[in-house]
Image (cartoon, rainbow, N blue to C red):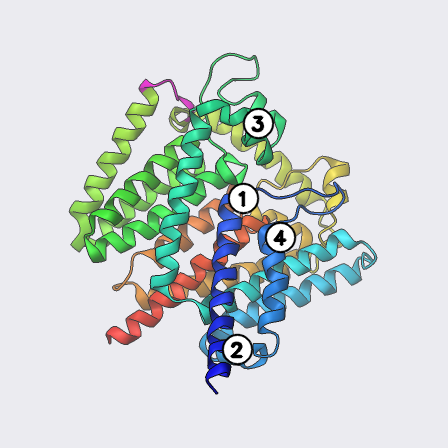
Amino acid sequence: MITGQKSEVFKSNLIQFLLLFSIVGTLLFPSIEIKTSIPKIEISDITFLLLIVLVIFDFKSTIKSYFKRDKLFLNFCLIFSLLIIVSIFLNSRYTNYRDWFEFLKLIKFIFFVICFYTYLNFNLLYKYLKIIFSLVFIFNILHYFNVFDFNKFVSPFYTSWMHLKFFGLNTLGQVDTKRAFGTMGNCNNNAFYFLSFLILFIDQYIKSKSKSDLTFLILALFGIFLCQSRIVFLTLIVLLFLSILILKNSRKFFLALLGLTLLFYLLFYLAGNVYLVSVQRIDLMTDASIGRFEQWIKIYHSMPGYWFFGHAPNKEYFETHQIYAESEYFLILFRYGVLGLLLFLGILAIAMIKFFKVFKFSFFPLAFVFSYSLNCITNSPFYGTKSLIQFAFFYVIILFLNDARKIEK
């Protein structure tokens, strides 16, 4: 009996370790490329297989328990995964293994959401997220200032040589704005990483008034400016103004935070990082918009005959026609048609509904879903494996906060 209990405790601890290590691997370690024709391997791919072995015998009861807790979200995700299969078969792409990776990616996302919620709790998750955030922040500092030739020896594992070649330079090779791509390998995704954590730390500081949470939120805000992402900067400004208008009890705090944001903006500008200044220039913003519209128009012109179920993932089409989605919404429209887009919007809506349930209790759900939805306009955060795992544990945090609200009642 005692041996059995020890075995269960060991198993539970091992599952928790693998789940936390999945987050560490996602946010801190680079992807591993084995072959150019298949997706890069993430730490979470390995832990995913190990976790399946550990939870397989309990998974039926686990998924039933989760289904009772969050059946609407789970149903939407499962229907989305079925739509991927239907789209693949309707487009006769069932022999193309690259398409099936997108299906597996969504199954993996569903699996991690269920396991994060079942085997972790908010306090444990938040404790380790702060440690992981600290390590990622240090990485970004070493990368941004190229300490000890960091960009020569470490950064090549995280991004392309082109990003490194023009890091801090314009296309003419002249000194220009530095935009940190960090462990995400992309400036915009890296900025959204910092924005997500900023929102989480704001939420916790409002409740705790802890100096530790205040320090972390200042670091997260600084991290956003290291990335110089226009869409994330604009999202942050809109978010702060909305918070000042809506959250009257915390108005002084958000006014102070807005002031700190403008101070960082000024300091980075004086240091020569002028990229964010382009948000004030209509001509530059118009040029950027035109570039994206051209890509979206290409997708629109490819849709006749594919409006309902899309083209399936079909990455070859994008490569052949030199299309870059530049938007999660247009990428999903191309791949899975209007049905896929509606399902994706449904997933975001469900998370938003959970915000309304905790609105007076927590700042995080509204701010995170709002920011994620805006980010999807000009980026594809649901497309990348790293971003998907990040979305999974942040969504689970929303569930934890909702549970806490019920206990408070």
Q: Please report whichever mark, 3 or 2, sits nearer to the chain's N-terminal start.
A: 2
Q: Main secondary structure of the magenta part?
A: loop
Give the image quarter of residue 365.
Answer: bottom left
Whole-angstrom CA distance, mark 1 to mark 2, is: 29 Å
> Mark 4 and 3 residues: CB-CB less than 8 Å, in contact?
no
Residue occupying image coordinates x 54% and y 71%: 74
Whether residue 196 is visible: no
Q: Please report whichever mark, 4 or 3, sits nearer to the chain's N-terminal start.
A: 3
Q: Dot 1 lies on which element?
A: loop
Residue closest to the eye, 385 or 31:
31
> Mark 3 and 1 residues: CB-CB less than 8 Å, in contact?
no
Which stretch appears magenta? 270-275
Mark 2 residue crowding within 10 angstroms, few (<14) / some (14–19) / many (20+): some
Whole-angstrom CA distance, mark 3 to mark 2, is: 43 Å
Q: Which residue is mark 2?
A: 62
* Residue 273 colored in magenta in the image: yes
Residue 255, position in %: x, y? 20, 41
Mark 3 residue crowding within 10 angstroms, few (<14) / some (14–19) / many (20+): some
Side (left or right) of 372 relative to 298: left
Q: Dot 2 lies on which element?
A: helix
Q: Which residue is mark 1?
A: 29
Circle 3 or circle 1, nearest the eye = 1
| The C terminus sits in image quarter | bottom left
Whole-angstrom CA distance, mark 4 to mark 2, is: 30 Å
Residue occupying image coordinates x 25% and y 29%: 263
Residue 267, position in %: x, y? 29, 24
Side (left or right) of 86 relative to 231: right
Q: Dot 3 lies on which element?
A: helix
Query: Where residue 163 is drawn, which disc sits there?
Result: 3
The three-letter code of the residue at mark 4 reads Ile
Whether residue 305 is visible: yes
